[in-house]
Amino acid sequence: MTIPLGSGHGITNLEGHADFDIVWPWNQPGGLRRGATAVLRVKNEAPGLRFVLPPLLRACDHVLLVDNGSDDGTGEEALRVASEHGLSDRFTLKTYPFQVARAGAEHLAVNERSVHSLAYFYNWCFSHVRTRYSWKWDGDMVLTTEGEVSMADLSWQVGMAEAVIRFPRHGLYIESDRRAFLDLGLRNIEEWGFPMSPDYVYTKAPEWEIRTTPERIEMFALPQGLCVELKWLDGDEFAHWTNPESFATSIRNRRKRREWLVWNALHAGEVPEGVVEITSPEGVHVVDHVTHTWLPRAPRPFVVDDPDHAKLHLRA
């Protein structure tokens, strides 16, 4: 009989770093309180936090950001943004000092109980959640106006629920403060909301970490247009992957193949089918324009002929 990973007191790491052993949060004194916490695992995400954090802090009971060795002032910027918006009481910053294996072959070679493992890192991050529900959030994901309202409604409703929530997002490739490219040619609705219990912990998968779930669960999918994923065209979008060229050969990497295609096409001066060029008004950052104005006003649903090489149709 296999013992579930989330059972017992927690997990000790192979390297003997006792300060970074994992204690499951449901075993902490007092247990878990009602509510939802967004958990961000970040490295060098400072430029986007002014867009990411404010709507997320307003939509959730708490936001936990774990900085994994940033050298661009990510932690300081996160604290500044939370304070500027008067939401410091909803924000916690923690640091994780170990280099974490990149997704792909590097991840596959690392033991699951090593502090360098993606699965161990994720479990350590989520072990600091003190609410009964959690959102697995990325440091480049920005809620739209609709998305903030939807997430806020859900954050109190799911406080006691055993439900997994799928949250759609669309890649927003940013060229400058006023010009960006929104990829509506990829349908990407991943699982982002999870209960906090021994049934929902992270384990090792072939190319990245994966959250375990019971055989039977309630699952809900939110509509599209609620969240964008920032991709700075002057940055290194694929730094957390061992070998981006492997996207072409892996059946599990359809989404990354699409991102690789769009990224390289835009750098070559081409706009792929399914990608919309957006220019914001004078004095308005393109991220704010897309999330507050463009996407909320766009006709629904977004209809594409093919997820990988789609011609976009906006159907009223």
Image: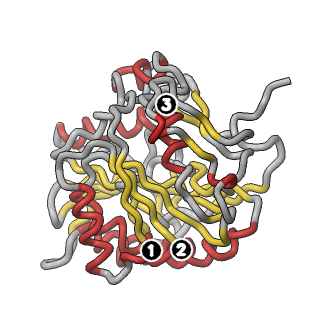
Residue type, label 1: Arg
Instruction: Find numbered disc 3 in the image and state the secondary structure of the residue it sits on.
Output: loop
Please tell me in which quadrant of the rendered image residue 76 appears: bottom left
* Mark 3 / mark 2, whichever is N-terminal: 2
Residue type, label 3: Asn
Instruction: Locate residue 90, reporting x and y percent.
Output: 44, 74
* Mark 2 / mark 1, whichever is N-terminal: 2
Instruction: Locate residue 247, reporting x and y percent.
Output: 42, 25
User: Is the C-beta separation of discs 3 and 2 under 8 Å?
Assistant: no
Q: Is disc 1 surrounded by few (<14), some (14 to 19) or many (20+) residues within 10 Å?
A: some
Residue type, label 2: Asp
Q: Disc 3 marks which residue?
A: 253
Q: Is residue 146 above or below residue 18?
A: below
Residue 41 shows in this picture: yes
User: Is the C-beta separation of discs 1 and 3 under 8 Å?
Assistant: no
Q: Could you give the CA–CA distance between mark 3 and mark 2, rounded to whole angstroms?
A: 33 Å
Q: Nearer the viewer, residue 314 or 35?
A: 35
Q: Residue at x 69, y 70 (%)?
A: 159
Q: Residue furthest bottom?
A: 86
Q: Is disc 3 surrounded by few (<14), some (14 to 19) or many (20+) residues within 10 Å?
A: some
* Mark 1 / mark 3, whichever is N-terminal: 1
User: Is the C-beta separation of discs 2 and 1 under 8 Å?
Assistant: yes
Q: Disc 1 marks which residue?
A: 90
